[in-house]
């Protein structure tokens, strides 16, 4: 693996520090070996033909994005309907689609994704294929099917069918079934257990005792667990049962957020998907009743975010890309950063931190990925425009001029790869 020297440009390090002049980066053996290069050393490297040199003058550098909530197997967004809606397809076709989706995600500057649920164990296979260099894609942290009760978000099939493997949820209605499903999924290679509460948070579909069985067993087996919890009640039991992060929490207010803060559990609001449907749902033929519902939940989430700030709750960054034909791969992975600035009072540097080093927990790689700092995995993007002006523009055509993953140049306008 060749050594890479990157000089010039402005740098966001992903740790929340103010943007600064790039002090010089040396990437070697897949990691940032040096951040800060002295002049004599730089001369030596510049004259070494074996070193790849990148001049990022007038460009912007940041760690590769981590999308903490992205689905690869719900179906290709251009191919509606999505799999969870009963679209019958084979595991084989699902896997091929997912491989293509993973590549699109990577090429848009996203070097890591956490996948909270999908059909079969496709995401586990995609993760391993990427790890072994068979296909290209981001680092993947994969869940299996959502652990659901009757009426939960992923219980979409008629009761006569219960939960077929092509669905994204598996029905478990007793503690014994939940325990067995956790063990079954871990045996099949998942990194993450995904639990589903009600779709919109109006009702609570799982009890504290049930969730505690899931979190205990998952943690005993050294995996992580998250929950789709829009409701106040499910947010509260999620915090008390000790999930690793809570998704959404739309209806959580002071009483619940106080517990979340005390337990130091991060919330991943994932409001990008709501924002996109509110703004573009009409163009895509989404029924007005669904758009209205999403607008309502978005408003609830905005109230939650204002309170979360008071409680100093850490926010993670996820977009739910791939959850519907509207949430296209490579288009909205950076939108959540704009949302954190707009609704949660985050500075641009803090928003980047949320989507990089803070989001490392969603890959199970805390302290190892998501920052441009010594010994971190060398994932970075070099952009034409300052991302903080409008984060969602990161994915604009031609903006990403260089993409490096694990110290390998994946794409670059700077010549040598
Ligand atoms: Zn999702």
Image (tube, helix red, strand yellow):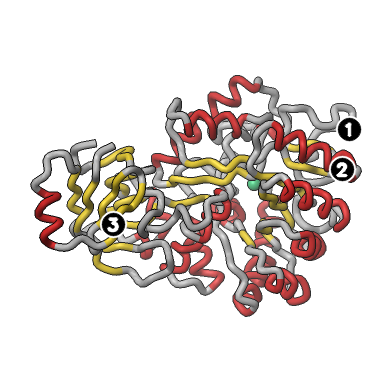
Numbered disc in front, either 3 or 2 = 3
Q: Can see residue 376?
A: yes
Question: Mark 3 near mark 2, Cβ–Cβ under 8 Å?
Answer: no
Determine crowd level at label 1: few under 14, some 14-19, many 20+ residues with C-alpha closer than 10 A. few
Q: Which residue matches tag 3?
A: 34
Give the mark nearer the N terminus: 1 vs 2.
2
Does the beta carbon at disc 1 come under 8 Å from ligand 1?
no
Q: Secondary structure at mark 2?
A: loop
* Front-most of residues 123 and 89: 123
- First reached walking from the N terminus: tag 3 or tag 1: 3
The reply to whether discs 3 and 1 touch (Cβ–Cβ < 8 Å) is no
Q: CA distance from mark 3 to mark 1?
A: 58 Å
Query: How far apart are the two marked residues, 1 and 2, measured between alpha carbons?
Result: 9 Å
Question: 10 Å neighbourhood of mark 3: few (<14), some, or many (≥20)?
Answer: some
Horizontal and vertical percent position of residue 41: 14, 57
Residue 345 picture location, percent across and down:
52, 74
Q: Based on the displayed image, in which of its 4 quarters is residue 314 positioned? A: bottom right
Side of 212 where 276 appears, left or right: left
Identify the residue under disc 1.
159
Q: Residue at x 81, y 62 (%)?
A: 237
Confirm or reject: label 3 Cβ below 8 Å from ligand 1. no
Q: How many marks?
A: 3
Q: Does 2 sit left or right of 325 as displayed? A: left
The residue indicated by pointer 2 is 150
Residue 183 position in % (x across, y down) = 77, 37
| Above or below, 407 relative to 62 | above
Kindly identify the residue that appears in the image at 29 percent across and 60 percent down: 35
């Amino acid at each position: 693996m060749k050594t890479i020297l990157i000089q010039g440009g402005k740098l966001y390090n992903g740790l929340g520090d103010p943007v600064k002049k790039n002090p010089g980066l040396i990437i070697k053996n897949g990691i940032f070996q040096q951040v800060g290069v002295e002049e004599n050393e730089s001369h030596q490297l510049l004259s070494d033909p074996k070193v790849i040199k990148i001049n990022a003058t007038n460009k912007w550098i940041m760690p590769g994005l981590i999308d903490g909530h992205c689905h690869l197997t719900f179906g290709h967004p251009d191919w509606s309907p999505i799999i969870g809606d009963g679209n019958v397809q084979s595991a084989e076709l699902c896997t091929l689609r997912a491989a293509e989706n993973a590549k699109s995600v990577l090429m848009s500057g996203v070097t890591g994704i956490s996948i909270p649920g999908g059909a079969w164990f496709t995401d586990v296979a995609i993760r391993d294929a990427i790890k072994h260099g068979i296909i290209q894609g981001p680092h993947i942290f994969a869940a299996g099917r959502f652990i659901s009760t009757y009426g939960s978000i992923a219980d979409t099939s008629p009761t006569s069918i219960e939960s077929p493997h092509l669905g994204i949820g598996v029905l478990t209605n007793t503690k014994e079934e939940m325990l067995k499903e956790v063990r079954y999924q871990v045996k099949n290679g998942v990194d993450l257990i995904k639990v589903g509460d009600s779709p919109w948070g109006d009702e609570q579909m799982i009890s504290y005792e049930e969730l505690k069985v899931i979190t205990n067993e998952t943690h005993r087996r050294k995996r992580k667990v998250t929950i789709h919890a829009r409701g106040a009640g499910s947010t509260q039991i999620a915090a008390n049962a000790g999930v690793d992060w809570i998704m959404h929490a739309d209806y959580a207010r002071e009483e619940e957020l106080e517990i979340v803060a005390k337990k130091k559990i991060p919330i991943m609001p994932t409001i990008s998907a709501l924002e996109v449907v509110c703004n573009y749902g009409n163009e895509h033929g989404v029924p007005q009743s669904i758009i209205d519902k999403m607008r309502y939940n978005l408003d609830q989430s905005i109230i939650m975010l204002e309170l979360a700030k008071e409680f100093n709750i850490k926010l993670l960054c996820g977009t739910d890309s791939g959850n519907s034909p509207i949430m296209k791969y490579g288009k909205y992975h950076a939108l959540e950063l704009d949302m954190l600035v707009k609704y949660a009072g985050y500075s641009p540097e803090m928003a980047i931190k949320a989507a990089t080093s803070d989001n490392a927990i969603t890959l199970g790689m805390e302290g190892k990925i998501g920052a441009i700092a010594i010994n971190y995995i060398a994932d970075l993007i070099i952009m034409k425009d300052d991302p903080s002006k409008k984060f969602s523009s990161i994915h604009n055509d031609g903006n990403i001029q260089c993409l490096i993953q694990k110290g390998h140049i994946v794409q670059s306008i700077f010549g040598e790869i």
